[in-house]
Image: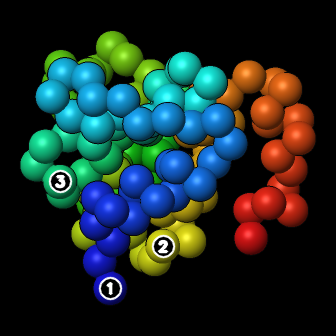
């Protein structure tokens, strides 16, 4: 089964204080107002927050899954190819990790590892 944009939307909106906002002609998802997922209109990938220092290692380890468009090279974002995901659990983990980077501590402190299941 290949994950799709609806799966990304469900995973993002399941997280506390997440809203969907249309920006730059595409859906974006925000935790307490801070963006953590975007869905470009090609619907084959989505973008998530990723520290620059970790991004290179992530892309080198799984280039078929992760990539960065040239225009986003200076950002703290990485794209994820939907077709390359192993399953919906992996999609949820990636979205959750990005949410944790954007959400305020009052949310992340109360959303523990037990909620990852």
The label on residue 88 is 2
Label 2 or label 1, whichever comes before in sequence order: 1
* Relative horizontal placement of residue 52, taking residue 84 as reference (left or right): right
Q: Is residue 56 above or below residue 11?
A: above
Determine if residue 85 is in view. Answer: yes
Asked whether the residues under the numbered discs 3 and 2 touch, taking CB atoms below 8 Å apart as contact, a structural biologist would say no
Q: Is residue 94 above or below residue 57?
A: below
Give the image location of residue 82, x and y in percent: 29, 62
Disc 3 to disc 2, C-alpha distance: 16 Å
Asked whether the residues under the numbered discs 2 and 1 touch, taking CB atoms below 8 Å apart as contact, a structural biologist would say yes
Can you name the residue that lies furthest to the top here? 74
Give the image location of residue 34, x and y in percent: 54, 20
Name the residue rendered at 47%, 25% in the picture.
35
Determine crowd level at label 2: few under 14, some 14-19, many 20+ residues with C-alpha closer than 10 A: some
* Relative horizontal placement of residue 101, taking residue 71 as reference (left or right): right
Give the secondary structure at mark 1.
loop
Label 3 or label 2, whichever comes before in sequence order: 3
Residue that label 1 marks? 1
Can you name the residue that lies furthest to the bottom here? 1
Give the secondary structure at mark 3.
loop
Name the residue rendered at 46%, 59% in the picture.
10
Determine crowd level at label 1: few under 14, some 14-19, many 20+ residues with C-alpha closer than 10 A: few
Determine crowd level at label 3: few under 14, some 14-19, many 20+ residues with C-alpha closer than 10 A: few
* Relative horizontal placement of residue 4, taking residue 77 as reference (left or right): left
Give the image location of residue 63, x and y in percent: 31, 54
Label 3 or label 1, whichever comes before in sequence order: 1
The label on residue 32 is none
* Residue closer to the observer: 112 or 19: 19
Give the secondary structure at mark 2.
helix
């Amino acid at each position: 089964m290949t994950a799709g944009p609806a799966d990304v939307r469900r995973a993002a909106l399941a997280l506390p204080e997440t809203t969907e906002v249309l920006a730059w002609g595409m859906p974006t998802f925000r935790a307490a107002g801070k963006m953590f997922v975007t869905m470009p209109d090609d619907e084959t990938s989505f973008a998530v927050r990723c520290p620059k220092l970790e991004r290179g290692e992530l892309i080198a380890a799984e280039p078929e899954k992760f990539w960065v468009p040239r225009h986003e090279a200076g950002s703290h974002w990485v794209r994820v190819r939907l077709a390359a995901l192993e399953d919906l659990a992996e999609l949820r983990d990636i979205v959750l990790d990005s949410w944790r980077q954007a959400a305020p501590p009052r949310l992340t402190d109360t959303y523990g590892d037990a909620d990852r299941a």
